Amino acid sequence: MESFSFIMIAFLIISAITVSVIRNLLSAVIIFMVYSLIMAILWQQLHAPDVAITEAAVGAGITTILFVITLKKIRGIKR
């Protein structure tokens, strides 16, 4: 179980760096969603299910939807 946590932390670091350097805004939002889902998994591994559910709902769900809507409104996503 400990090796799983180390793998998740490695993916967390990779996704955080990737969000910082990527140029495409939609790709950055999707990778940020992956970051939030990995955080939710790590919170669950730390036996904090309430924090994990909140991270998944707010971090990966609502925030991603708001970012995508904002990108559409500012024409960041081409149709």
Image (cartoon, grey):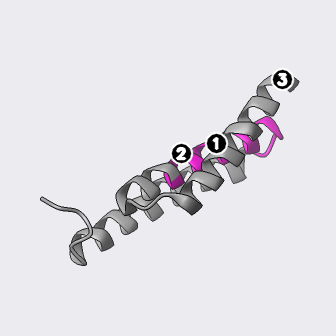
| First in residue order: circle 2 vs circle 3 | 3
Q: Secondary structure at mark 3?
A: helix
| First in residue order: circle 3 vs circle 1 | 3
User: Which residue is the site of mark 2?
Assistant: 34
Amino acid marked by disc 3: Ser
The one of 7 and 20 positioned closer to us in this rendering: 20
Q: Secondary structure at mark 1?
A: helix
| Residue drawn at 57 percent across, 52 percent down | 18
User: Which residue is the site of mark 1?
Assistant: 38
| Residue drawn at 27 percent across, 69 percent down | 76
10, above or below 24, in the image: above
- In percent of width and height, residue 64 lies at 43, 59
Residue range highlighted in magenta = 32-48
- In percent of width and height, residue 30 lies at 43, 51
The one of 55 and 70 positioned closer to us in this rendering: 70
Task: Find the distance from the CA under tag 3 to the CA under tag 1.
Answer: 15 Å
The one of 70 and 10 positioned closer to us in this rendering: 10
5, above or below 54, in the image: above
29, above or below 41, in the image: below
Amino acid marked by disc 2: Val
Amino acid marked by disc 1: Ile
Task: Find the distance from the CA under tag 2 to the CA under tag 3.
Answer: 20 Å
| Residue drawn at 40 percent across, 53 percent down | 27
**CB-based contact (under 8 Å), mark 2 and mark 1:** yes
| Residue drawn at 12 percent across, 59 percent down | 79
- In percent of width and height, residue 57 lies at 52, 54
